[in-house]
């Protein structure tokens, strides 16, 4: 049995399997590739791998469209390979966390193939249907990847509801038989020895399309409690929900310490700050630093003692953090380490997205070199609305999900050591400079900085349980805070920008012991922070 709350001190590494490591030259990463890289991950010091979906899938949305939840996609290998991965990972002290997509399935799932045969079919009610006439939509709800959320099926003369692509029909959680099928799927994977689950868009499952309710539907928490009682509680598994709509109030329900719902959720308030208010992520705006500090402060303080945060900058849907809020040029190493310090010093479970530990950057490709369904849906829609190609490319450079999905940069050999064949998406040309081989043995690399931060977390309980107090909230360049658990006290100071700044660190406490910093101690002046300088001190 896993120890209660073990995931509070765990560090989780996210793998996008199709871009991690290919071993058979087909240009797609695979299970054997992950197995091959387990020693690298063990060296980094992580506890879990969040594995993006590897189930059987037509890959319309890179696996977030599942056609068989109890099988793996042949592009990644066989079920035997998957079982080998789960077992070998354990030998390296690592648990696999599965990514489950329970809000929708693929339209090629056997349930949906049955469901659209007739209204009397036993699987019909597994999906969300509304009567109507061809061409007269039930309402004007839109799908996330473009177009209407309703799709006509002539055989049943009804529309089905899909919040993402037409190939991702929404499941109807009102149906208890469907819910039981979902619990069975979760238990199928628990029986295989996984350590938990990341639950895709779990805030959408209680949708009520007739009232245009998508997130936070009236029965949402009831459903989650039912799921947890039937599954995760079996073994104190980690469960993390993806919830774009969470506020601290709602997050406290999800991550209630009584364990009745989930371990924690991903909230995205900080992630949505560099876009124009009320608009979409493509509508770029500079990061409002003060607001950014307020948002972190709010989440850190409001969940203290009554909920649990997840800490992340990156995932497979987001641009690379060093390009986004750091400096991908001159200060790439310093800024990547500063961002890591800022995040890993806070309270919550930290997530590292593959390549983040190397300071991998965004890309600027030709339109046809991109692969993401979201990007092409947006491009088509906005071109029709009159946006120019150039305007849209700027948005794509800054925000496309493909920024995160380019192959992992392992070494300087062709295709960055990712594949011997042709990769499914182009490798970032900067792999000759930015790659794991160059960093693993270089003591002051970004990789080794992450390693040290992880070790600090393991050594100092205050990083897990200490109370967070923001310092100098109004400072327009410094992000500084305290962590205090009554026994131990830390001071974290970060210069968020690329110019030197005076900051009276020595006034914060008399006796400071530097635990980690992203510059060498040579020429260090306590009260001057160099570009993107970050330090963690122990206050004695
Ligand atoms: O993402 C949820 C989601 O809302 C995304 O559409 C998100 O808004 C977008 O990616 C931000 O650019 C999850 C998965 O993480 C994503 O990869 C899937 O495409 C989506 O669900 C559908 O399953
Ligand atoms: Ca492969």
Image (cartoon, rainbow, N blue to C red):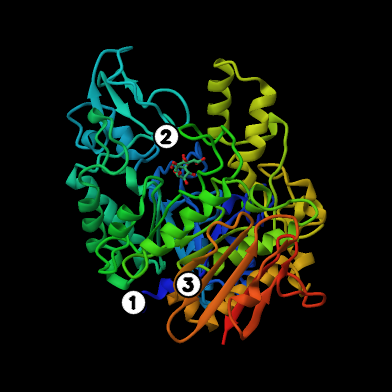
Q: CA distance from mark 2 to mark 3?
A: 32 Å
Q: Would you identify the image quadrant in which residue 514 lies?
A: bottom right
Q: Position of residue 374 (x, y in %)?
A: 53, 34
For residue 43, say whether it is visible: no
Q: Is the residue 493 above or below the residue 56 in the image?
A: below
In percent of width and height, residue 75 lies at 56, 48
Label 3 crowd (10 A; few <14 / some 14-19 / many >=20): many
Q: Secondary structure at mark 3?
A: loop
- Residue 10 is labelled as 3
The Cα–Cα distance between marks 3 and 1, rounded to whole angstroms, is 12 Å
* Residue ID for mark 1: 4
Q: Residue at x 31, y 72 (%)?
A: 235
Q: Secondary structure at mark 2?
A: loop
**Circle 1 SS class:** loop
Closer to the camera in the image, 363 or 155: 363
Quadrant into which the C terminus falls:
bottom right
């Amino acid at each position: 049995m896993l120890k209660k709350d073990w995931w509070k001190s765990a560090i989780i590494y996210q793998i996008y399997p199709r871009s991690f490591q290919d071993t058979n030259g087909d240009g797609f990463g695979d299970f054997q590739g992950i197995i091959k890289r387990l020693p690298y991950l063990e060296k980094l010091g992580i506890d879990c791998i969040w594995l993006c979906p590897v189930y059987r899938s037509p890959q319309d949305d890179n696996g977030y469209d599942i056609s068989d939840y109890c099988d793996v996609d042949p592009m990644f290998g066989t079920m035997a390979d998957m079982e080998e991965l789960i077992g070998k990972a354990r030998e390296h002290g690592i648990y696999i966390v599965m990514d489950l997509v329970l809000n929708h399935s693929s339209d090629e799932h056997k349930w949906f193939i049955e469901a659209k045969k007739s209204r009397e079919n036993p699987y019909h009610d597994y999906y969300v249907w509304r009567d109507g006439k061809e061409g007269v939509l039930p309402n004007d709800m839109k799908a996330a990847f473009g177009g209407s959320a309703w799709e006509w099926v002539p055989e049943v003369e009804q529309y089905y509801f899909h919040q993402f692509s037409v190939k991702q029909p929404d499941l109807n959680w009102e149906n208890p038989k469907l819910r039981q099928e979902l619990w069975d799927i979760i238990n199928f994977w628990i029986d295989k020895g996984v350590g938990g689950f990341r639950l895709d868009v779990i805030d959408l499952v209680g949708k009520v399309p007739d009232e245009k309710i998508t997130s936070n539907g009236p029965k949402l928490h009831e459903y989650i409690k039912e799921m947890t009682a039937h599954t995760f509680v079996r073994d104190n598994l980690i469960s993390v929900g993806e919830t774009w709509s969470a506020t601290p109030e709602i997050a406290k329900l999800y991550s209630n310490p009584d364990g009745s719902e989930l371990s924690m959720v991903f909230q995205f308030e900080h992630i949505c700050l560099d876009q124009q208010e009320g608009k979409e992520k493509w509508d770029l705006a500079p990061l409002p630093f003060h607001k950014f500090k307020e948002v972190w402060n709010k989440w850190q303080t409001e969940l203290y003692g009554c909920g649990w945060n997840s800490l992340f900058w990156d995932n497979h849907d987001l641009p690379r953090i060093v390009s986004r809020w750091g400096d991908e040029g001159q200060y790439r190493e310093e800024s990547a380490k500063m961002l890591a310090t800022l995040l890993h010093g806070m309270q919550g479970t930290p997530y590292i997205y593959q390549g983040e530990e190397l300071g991998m950057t965004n890309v600027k490709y030709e339109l046809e070199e991109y692969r993401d369904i979201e990007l092409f849906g947006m491009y088509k829609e906005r071109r029709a609305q009159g946006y120019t190609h150039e305007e849209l490319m700027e948005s794509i450079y800054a925000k496309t999900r493909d920024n995160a999905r380019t192959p992992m940069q392992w070494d300087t050999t062709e295709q960055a050591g990712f594949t011997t064949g042709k990769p499914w998406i182009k490798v970032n040309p900067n792999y000759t400079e930015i790659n794991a081989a160059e960093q693993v043995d270089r003591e002051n690399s970004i990789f080794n900085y992450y390693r040290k931060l992880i070790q600090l977390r393991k050594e100092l309980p205050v990083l897990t349980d200490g109370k967070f107090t923001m310092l100098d909230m109004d400072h327009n360049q410094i992000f500084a805070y305290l962590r205090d658990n009554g026994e131990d006290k830390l001071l974290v100071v970060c210069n968020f920008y690329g110019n030197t700044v005076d900051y009276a660190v020595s006034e914060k406490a008399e006796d400071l012991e530097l635990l980690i910093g992203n510059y060498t101690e040579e020429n260090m002046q306590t009260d001057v922070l160099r570009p993107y300088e970050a330090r963690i001190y122990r206050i004695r």
